[in-house]
Amino acid sequence: MLRRAKKRSVATELTKNDGISSQGIPETAPKTAKQADGETRPSERRRELPVLGSRIPKPDFERQLEDVVLGGQDSIVNKLQVEDREIGVLDREQRKPAWQDEGEDVIQSSTAKKDKDEALVPNNSGTKFSRSRKVEFEKVVGSTPAWAQLKSKRTNSESEDESGSDDEDEEDRLLRRTGDYLTSSEALPKSYLNFRRVTDANKEQYTKSRLHAMEFHPTSQVILTAGEDESLHIFQVDGKNNPKIQSVAVEKFPILSAHFSADGTEVIMSSRSRWYYVYDMIAGKMERVSFLREYSERQPLCKFAVSPDGQFIAFQGLYGFIHLLSAKNKELISTLKMNGLVKSIAFSGDGSKLLSFGDDGEVYVWDMKTRDCVHKFVDEGCIQGSTISVSRDGQYIACGSHSGVLNIYDNHCLTEVRPKPVRAVMNLTTQITASKFNHNSEIVATASFHTANSVKLIHLPDCHVFPNFPNHADTIGLATELDFSPNGGYMAVGNNKGKAMLYRLGHYKNY
């Protein structure tokens, strides 16, 4: 009985010390005077509430172990609060420039080099350290070179003339620029021609017979086609659809030649008759013109040429006659006469001269102001001439013959009696029936109607024949006409089936 009473008294004392009643319910500790007045400090509150584990107080040995390992409850709480404050400070911290080196702000001299660099490396700030290094650099290399100085900091003591300052400014602009300084050449490559065939220019309405006339408009993206089907067709050139603009029927008048006027407002057409037609594109009217009333013999006006300056129209006549008309009022001005038969005529690029090629192989040069023959030369090796063409800049002249040889001359032939050609192109074996220069005299095209696919393009000034034109898979047929667009972007080839085949030359960006 005594042992039982002692055990009960001991249990009662333990429960009182732990704040638990004898019924197992925790008892609240009595409040102090400060707590009753509401002046309890936050630190004391944190001490009352345990951080780790349950609310039951821990034995002394556990508290001692916790203090040794974790530093105690108070230190843990303080560390957590400090970490919360540090997170907010880091988020609001201003970023430093990427080029700023923290090592220059705090300099620590190495013990190994302390004696050597003690005078050069001060232990105060990075600015002084940078200045000291700059002084050492200038002692070895010298002062900052002129090219590395800013323009505002350059000394005014340097005496520079105007040309020198311009060169320096140009150098400055080059030094500030990055990228490629070399650009691709604007000259046409001679080894390979970049081209592709596009939609035929007259696809919406082919000529029903051989194509005798085909020409690009001098200023607009327009091309005309005509033939012996007694009709004139005008198309817009876009390389995709090439829509038809207009068709004009000329009754009982098979068209053998047709050209735009110099200003592009009229179309002049000729045939085997003693008259020709002029179609006004703006007014939409057709006019018949005749000027050979004084000639008793029949003089068909099959072929003609229009001067680029818009002053003259030259018709090829019989027996070596060339009829010169005014392009404005269509009146006969003069008649030129050469030996032999006239096979081909062509105006110079400025319209000041007319060149005529005879069947005897002689080339006549006519002055349009005086209407006199100012020069004559012989085409080398020519037995019978067939066609002649002049480049727009007057630098080259091409003479084709019945033997299939195309002689290319420079402008020295206008002063020499027997000039030597720059190149004799012998890639064709039948009569040359057409030749044409492009706008900048980099290409001359030549063709023969007597052999299928006989079209060649020659690069100038190298006189190298492009080997990849025409394409082996491309069927041209018998070529009748050749022409280039005003800026060389397109080339057209007419054939015996009435088609105007259109090619896009990739080197030239404009129409």
Image (cartoon, rainbow, N blue to C red):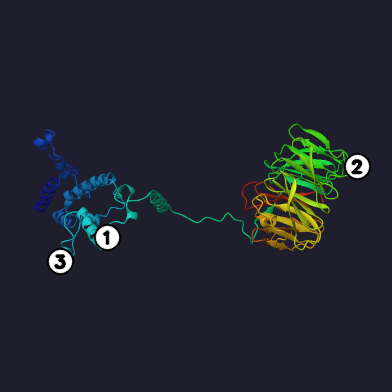
Q: Position of residue 218 (x, y in %)?
A: 69, 43
Kindly identify the amino acid type of the residue bearing the numbered disc 2: Ser
Residue 467 visible within the image: no
Kindly identify the amino acid type of the residue bearing the numbered disc 3: Asp
Q: Position of residue 193 (x, y in %)?
A: 65, 58
User: For numbered disc 2, what is the local secondary structure?
Assistant: loop
Q: Position of residue 265 (x, y in %)?
A: 72, 36
Mark 3 or 2 closer to N-term?
3
Using the image as rendered, state which of residue 370 and residue 289 is in the foreground: 370
Residue under label 3, please give it.
Answer: 115
Q: Position of residue 22 (x, y in %)?
A: 16, 44
139 with respect to 148 (left or right): left
Cα separation between marks 2 and 1: 98 Å
Above or below 226: residue 363 = below
Residue under label 1, please give it.
Answer: 142
Question: Going by the picture, which residue comes out furthest to the bottom?
Answer: 112
